[in-house]
Image (cartoon, rainbow, N blue to C red):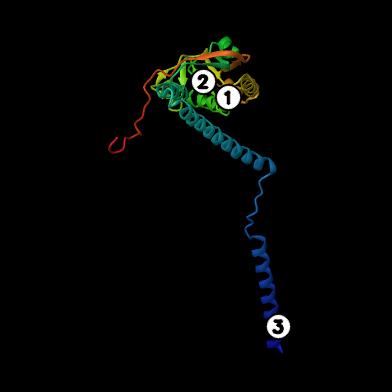
């Protein structure tokens, strides 16, 4: 009799243990569903659409160049070549450029001046953050304290000095000039930077940013240094 009761008790415990294990596995099963909210998905979609738009713009520019060659090459090939070279120089930042834009005046904060705090250069990481904020807009060209910023420009600390294109920039106040594709884009950039949290980051370093009203004509200097092409190699027979 005791053996029968013990056997039944063992079976009951086995069933309870099996059910507990099944429930534990069910609760701990990985759920691979995407829990991102709608806003995150919209942001990702917006970034993908922006990349697609940039690619279409580049394709359009290449099509225009090919059309110029097709229409004018037989008439004046040298003129077409010169025009193409000038377009490339302008795109690379090697030519002076004039267009609609805004100016940023970076100055010591009033509190720093009143307290007699030492005014130092803008930290490189802070300046890079500002440039990244500006480059959120397409077709932007800029110059920092007279130094034209291009794709190969490096902003870094060299021997304790903040440099742009290896040239030390002055301590504030200094001017950052920005041009855009149109007055409409210049106004959008003005509104965006006016509301940006980058002002708070600069204020922590005792600096303020004053933004000028959009201007119809703003001139940026050409990049006047040698472009480093150490990673480019000519193939055999070239």
Indicate the secondary structure of the residue bearing disc 1. helix
- The location of residue 43, given as percent across then percent down, is 64, 38
In the image, residue 60 sits, relative to residue 21, either above or below, namely above
In the image, residue 32 sits, relative to residue 102, either above or below, namely below
- The location of residue 47, given as percent across then percent down, is 60, 37
Crowding at mark 2 (Cα within 10 Å: few <14, some 14-19, many 20+): many
Q: Residue at x 68, y 68 (%)?
A: 20
Q: Which residue is mark 3?
A: 8
**In-front residue for pair 101/80:** 80
Indicate the secondary structure of the residue bearing disc 3. helix
Left or right: where 237 falls relative to 101: left
- The location of residue 149, given as percent across then percent down, is 47, 22
Do the numbered discs 3 and 2 sit on residues whose CB atoms are within 8 Å?
no
Q: Which residue is mark 1?
A: 201
Q: CA distance from mark 3 to mark 2?
A: 84 Å
- The location of residue 74, given as percent across then percent down, is 43, 26
**In-front residue for pair 85/225:** 85
Residue 142 circle label: 2
């Amino acid at each position: 009799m005791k053996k029968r009761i013990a056997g039944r008790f063992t079976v009951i415990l086995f069933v309870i243990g099996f059910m507990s294990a099944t429930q534990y596995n069910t609760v701990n099963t990985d759920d691979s569903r995407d829990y991102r909210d709608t806003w995150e998905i919209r942001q990702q979609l917006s970034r993908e659409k922006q990349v697609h738009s940039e690619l279409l713009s580049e394709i359009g520019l290449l099509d225009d160049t090919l059309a110029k060659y097709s229409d004018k090459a037989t008439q004046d090939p040298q003129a077409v070549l010169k025009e193409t070279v000038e377009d490339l120089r302008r795109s690379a930042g090697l030519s002076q450029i004039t267009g609609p834009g805004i100016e940023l005046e970076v100055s010591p904060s009033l509190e720093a001046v009143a307290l007699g705090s030492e005014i130092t250069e803008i930290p490189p990481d802070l300046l890079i953050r500002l440039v990244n904020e500006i480059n959120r807009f397409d077709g932007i060209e800029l110059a920092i304290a007279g130094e034209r910023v291009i794709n190969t420009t490096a902003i870094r600390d060299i021997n304790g000095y903040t440099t742009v294109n290896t040239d030390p920039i002055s301590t504030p106040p200094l001017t950052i000039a920005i041009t855009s594709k149109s007055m409409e884009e210049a106004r959008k950039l003005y509104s965006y930077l006016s509301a940006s949290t980058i002002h708070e980051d600069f204020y922590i370093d005792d600096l303020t940013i004053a933004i000028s009203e959009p201007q119809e004509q703003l001139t940026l200097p050409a990049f006047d240094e040698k472009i480093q092409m150490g990673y480019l190699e000519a193939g055999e027979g070239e």
